[in-house]
Image (cartoon, rainbow, N blue to C red):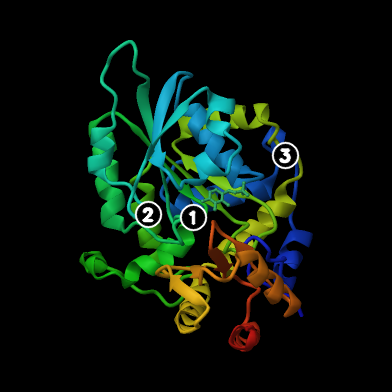
Amino acid sequence: MIIDLRSDTVTKPSKGMLEAMFNAAVGDDVFGEDPTVIKLEKKIAKLFNKESALFCPSGTMTNQIAIKVQTQPGDELLCDTTSHIYNYEGAGISFNSGVQAKLLCGKGGQISSQQILENINQNFDWLAHTSLVCIENTANRAGGSYYSLAQMQELSKTCNQNKLKLHLDGARIFNAIVEIPRLKKISKLKFNDQNNSRYNSQYELIAQEIGGCFNSISVCLSKGLGAPIGSLLLGNAEFINKARRVRKVFGGGMRQAGYLAAAGIYALDNNIKRLNEDHKRAKYLSNLITEFSYVDSVLPVYTNIIIFNLNKKIKPDVFIQKLAKNNIKAVSFGKNAVRFVTHLDFTDDMLEKVEKSLKNIF
Ligand SMILES: *Cc1c(COP(=O)(O)O)cnc(C)c1O
């Protein structure tokens, strides 16, 4: 048995998901004729209370389309130094949109209204026009930390007041959505728990509130939700019409994509609530790891990502090789750090095996 903790993208479709894919009704989506793609787009738009949505092959594409549609060449966008759009999308901000990024040093991947206000360029010919703010929730490189609803609402207000567009890179937004109710501040929202609801109604309510904060939202189906492929871009109808044209230019117009959309519908129906299990296992692992003498420090674990620093005498590559000998896969993450990500295909059984291996590795 191989235990893969490199990323939550490594999951394979379950039997139920494959059945849903096999049975999907399909058509040519470039002609707007794939009923399952349309169903998925309507479903996610409704969940976040947005007018429209667009199904795309990847989260990189949904982010890049959002930037392209909401900027002009020569503009500047604001984002955190750790952000995926800046670090892991092949300089797409400049390549695709002719835009530059001003990097803000947030706290644990989170930027503040204050920082935004301090970094809006004045209206001089020689300064780039600040037009867009991008935030990431949960923040990948910052160890899966998440913004609360109140924080997102505050950023939204600031951007509105200053005529800035606000984009959410919500590759792992559902990991945030299942954690947010645990925050005490949430109690001012009233939840009516309906047991027959397919989602936890709490989560629906939080998704609606999040929807109201952003001009555009990107969510991934192929991370914690366990679909093989696919991300969705959400916004108002006018934005999505423009996004559809850009998707075609970027080569992302797909034909009988309903087979993939069916996996996405299945993921939304079945795999949101269970993210709590990934978070529990991540917390368990982090508590365990803290105690080993070969570990210097463990970043706080907020969701499903565990980043820990090894003792200076131990090179991450050596540690990772030792893990590999125990059939455990992980990635090094910066100088002395290692990252584990828990996911749908990581079971309690595997957790036990990892625990044993970590205890006996040196
Ligand atoms: C994974 C990820 C994306 C999108 O990645 P793709 O591999 O292109 O789907 C975007 N943002 C964040 C924060 C991510 O973790």
**Quarter location, residue 215:** top left
Q: Are marks 1 and 2 in contact (CB under 8 Å)?
A: no
- Dot placed on the residue nearer the N-terminal end, 2 or 3: 2
Quadrant holding the N terminus: bottom right
The C terminus sits in image quarter: bottom right
Q: Amino acid at mark 2?
A: Gln
Q: Residue at x 29, y 24 (%)?
A: 121
Q: Is residue 362 left or right of residue 49?
A: right
Residue 254's disc number: 3
315 vs 53, nearest the viewer: 315
Q: Nearer the viewer, mark 1 or mark 2?
A: 1
- Give how far apart the Cα atoms at labels 3 and 1 are: 30 Å
Q: Position of residue 103 (x, y in %)?
A: 40, 37
Badge 1 marks a residue whose secondary structure is: loop
Left of 213 or right of it: where is 322?
right
- Mark 1 or mark 2: whose residue is earlier in sequence: 1
Any part of residue 313 in sight:
yes
Relative depth, front residue between 354 and 130: 354
Q: Which residue is mark 1?
A: 141
Residue beneath disc 2? 208
For the point 45% across and 25% down, the residue is 71
**Would you call the spot at circle 3 few (<14 residues within 10 Å), some (14-19), or many (20 or more)?**
some
Q: Give the Cα separation between the discs numbered 2 and 3.
A: 28 Å
Residue type pointed to by label 3: Met
